[in-house]
Amino acid sequence: MATIDFSEEIPALRATLASIEKVTDLDALTRKIEDLEAQAAAPDLWDDPDEAQKITSALSHAQAERRRVDELGSRIDDLEVMVELAAEESDADTLEEAESEFAAIRRALDELEVRTLLSGEYDERNAVVTIRAGAGGVDAADFAEMLLRMYLRWAERHEYPTKVMDTSYAEEAGLKSVTFEVSAPYAYGTLSVEGGTHRLVRISPFDNQGRRQTSFAAVEVIPLIESTDSIEIPETELKIDVFRSSGPGGQSVNTTDSAVRMTHIPTGIVVSMQDEKSQIQNRAAALRVLQSRLLLLKKQEEDAKRKELAGDVKASWGDQMRSYVLNPYQMVKDLRTNHETGNTTAVFDGEIDDFIEAGIRWRVQQQRETGDA
């Protein structure tokens, strides 16, 4: 006996897909692919390896986006045929398979639909994520490392390339801070809802009395700037220090002063970079991240000024946005959306799509209510 009314649900799937296709603008996407293919076919493409990498990566992402939409259309067609066959032959196994495929298609459409809600100025960019240990001592440093693994596993599940750009290890365990880049279409728009204060409650593995400990970590997400962005920083506004890169416990991983710490004097923003092998490369990487932070700061100031002029003083984000409770019960709960799950192990293993999607939908709703959409 079917638990799904396919006569209603299949047309609903098609309607959702049609809406996604309209927002995605498949004609524009096709033109973009053709233009990138022409650039990728140029005989002098690899004369500039960095530019070539950007072109081929953009082409791959655009083709994948188009393929996802096309494949969903084909899967809905196949589902309809499967349902018809199951009905004609009263085949319970085929009907069960159809219900499973319907759920998978619904999930894929939900993911694409959430993507259409990302329309911010920088949402399409790569993301630079920084995690900093907060209050809670060694537990907070350990929590920061747990969050790093969570986000890297999330990116791995989606086959998004990541690159750890800077790591500051805590003395006993865990991390004081870490910065990494996620390279994927809409990485910033997707991960931006993860920004805020995260709280962990558990029996501390570092407390010999086995007491429950609450610790905090801050997550910052910024868009990575592109060469076309106009953020100029005068040399007089920069203080640059160089030092040796090091690993856990102070073990030297570089015998030269290649790591760079860049301070923007007017704002006090500090960026450290030690992933690259040379000081020049680390300096360039640090400058890009600093420019990204200044770009976002500029936008935030403009948004705040606009809200002030409009008389809107309501804060849209609280300090504590998500709690991870491991004792006395198992629960991860987002305090903005109220989305929650008892499967804490899966969350720390990177299964956070539901939280991200709920956050994006919540943010859009908040923007609509305040007239910022």
Image (cartoon, rainbow, N blue to C red):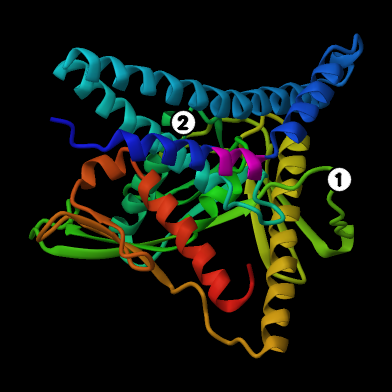
Question: Position of 234 compared to 327: left or right?
Answer: right
Q: Which residues are magenta?
A: 18-24
Task: Determine the image quadrant of residue 49.
Answer: top right
Q: Does residue 51 appear anywhere in the picture?
A: yes
Residue 279 against residue 328 in the figure, above or below:
above
Sequence-first tag of 1 and 2: 2
* Residue 270 at x, y percent in the picture: 65, 59
Closest to the observer: 16 or 62?
A: 16
Task: Determine the image quadrant of residue 78.
Answer: top left
Q: Quadrant of the N terminus?
A: top left
Task: Determine the image quadrant of residue 8.
Answer: top left
Q: Secondary structure at mark 2?
A: loop
Which residue corresponds to mark 1?
Answer: 228
- Distance between the alpha carbons at the discs numbered 1 and 2: 28 Å
* Residue 373 at x, y percent in the picture: 63, 67
Q: Name the residue rendered at 84%, 56% in the picture.
A: 231
Query: Which disc, if any, is residue 55?
Result: none
Q: Residue most toward the top?
A: 43
The three-letter amino acid code for the residue at tag 2 is His
Q: Does residue 181 appear anywhere in the picture?
A: no
* Residue 27 at x, y percent in the picture: 75, 32
Q: Name the residue rendered at 57%, 39% in the picture.
A: 18
Q: Name the residue rendered at 78%, 30% in the picture.
A: 32
Residue 343 against residue 318 in the figure, above or below:
above
Are there few (<14), some (14-19), or many (20+) residues within 10 Å of tag 2?
A: few
Q: Does residue 235 show up magenta in the picture?
A: no
The number of numbered discs placed on residues in the rendered structure image is 2
